[in-house]
Amino acid sequence: MARILVTGGAGFIGSHLCERLLAEGNEVICIDNFLTGSPDNIAPFFGNQRFQFIQQDVTNFVYVPGKLDAILHFASPASPIDYLELPIQTLKVGSLGTHKVLGLAKEKRARILLASTSEVYGDPLVHPQKEDYWGNVNPIGPRGVYDEAKRFAEAITMAYQRAHGVVTRIVRIFNTFGPRMRMRDGRVVPNFIAQALRGEDVTVYGDGGQTRSFCYVSDLVEGILRLLWSDHPTPVNVGNPREMTVLEFAKMIIELTGSKSAIVHKPLPVDDPKVRQPDIALARRVLNDWHPVVPVEEGLARTIEHFRAKIQESA
């Protein structure tokens, strides 16, 4: 049994990590300030004696009494609607927050895994994206607050590894979906599903020819935990290499929901990536042949049922 801290543990991915770690018998400490996370995501864990919750902003001093074996640093707004509305908070949690949590890992002699993102590649000029690609990011564009926050977080994480000997791991997360995403998250999956279930027009930005690669959350969690306990010290892509256009994805969701929604097109947001597809050869090699096992269609069916129940509850 390990004692593990999860920052951003009330968020979409963070809560799934807490659930998996508890199921494996670990002691879990969750830190969240509910800026974008939700108490509903962690409510089922409060009856578990191995679960502890601390409501706190990690950009302030972080103190956790007792030993820590590992830290999973997932605190950050993570959807365009969030970091466009919360640009300063996004930059602060990626810089100050990461600094504070790395300091805690150093003090506790705990290994730490940083949740980074495929957004460090920006609007990529290399396809698919490999870990040795340095990216094509607009540092002063509206998305730059998230992209550069994560790029800085990677840099300071590697600095703590080299200067202080902290055991660090970095996961570059590609588009992930599943239950517990927020209805008004602003990302493709919740947007399309909510619109289709309500019979509203499904909004596709641009001509829909831009591509994404969608990974179901349980596959992502498996990859993250394999990386956490691995001996690989540099960033690793974790995502689904199955590439689809956004328009194809919209049509798939309309079909799976049985909706009669029409597809409407709106202007493409500034700096929206044209392509996104992970090269997961490194993950296969260093994470015991990790690869996604949940088909996109099956994951979508589970996610649609989650959203259907949420819509019925709010009706």
Image (tube, helix red, strand yellow):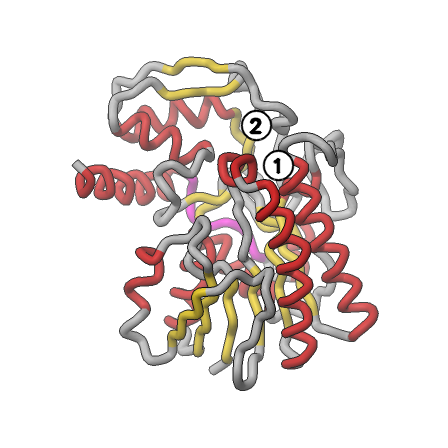
Magenta residues (range): 290-296
| Residue 154, x across and y down, in percent | 72, 55
Foreground residue, 256 or 154? Answer: 154
| Residue 309, x across and y down, in percent | 21, 43
**Kind of residue at disc 2:** Thr
**Mark 2: few, some, or many residues within 10 Å (few <14, many ≥20)?**
some
**Kind of residue at disc 1:** Gln
Give the mark nearest the N terminus, 2 or 1: 2
Q: Residue at x 46, y 73 (%)?
A: 29
**Mark 1: few, some, or many residues within 10 Å (few <14, many ≥20)?**
many
Alpha carbons under labels 2 and 1: distance apart: 8 Å
Q: Which residue is mark 2?
A: 211
Question: Extreme right residue here?
Answer: 163
| Residue 125, x across and y down, in percent | 75, 30
Q: Residue at x 65, y 40 (%)?
A: 145
Q: Name the disc covering residue 136, or none.
A: none
Q: Which residue is mark 1?
A: 277
Tell me the element at label 2.
Answer: strand
| Dominant SS in magenta | loop
User: Residue 70 falls in which quadrant of the image?
Assistant: bottom right
| Residue 179, x across and y down, in percent | 35, 48
From this viewpoint, is residue 288 visible? Answer: no
Does residue 180 appear left or right of residue 237 in this picture? Answer: left
Seen in the picture, residue 292 relative to 81 is either above or below; the reply is below
Does residue 222 appear left or right of residue 289 in this picture? Answer: left
Does residue 121 appear left or right of residue 45 in this picture? Answer: right
Is 58 covered by the magenta stretch? no
Does residue 15 appear left or right of residue 76 in this picture? Answer: left
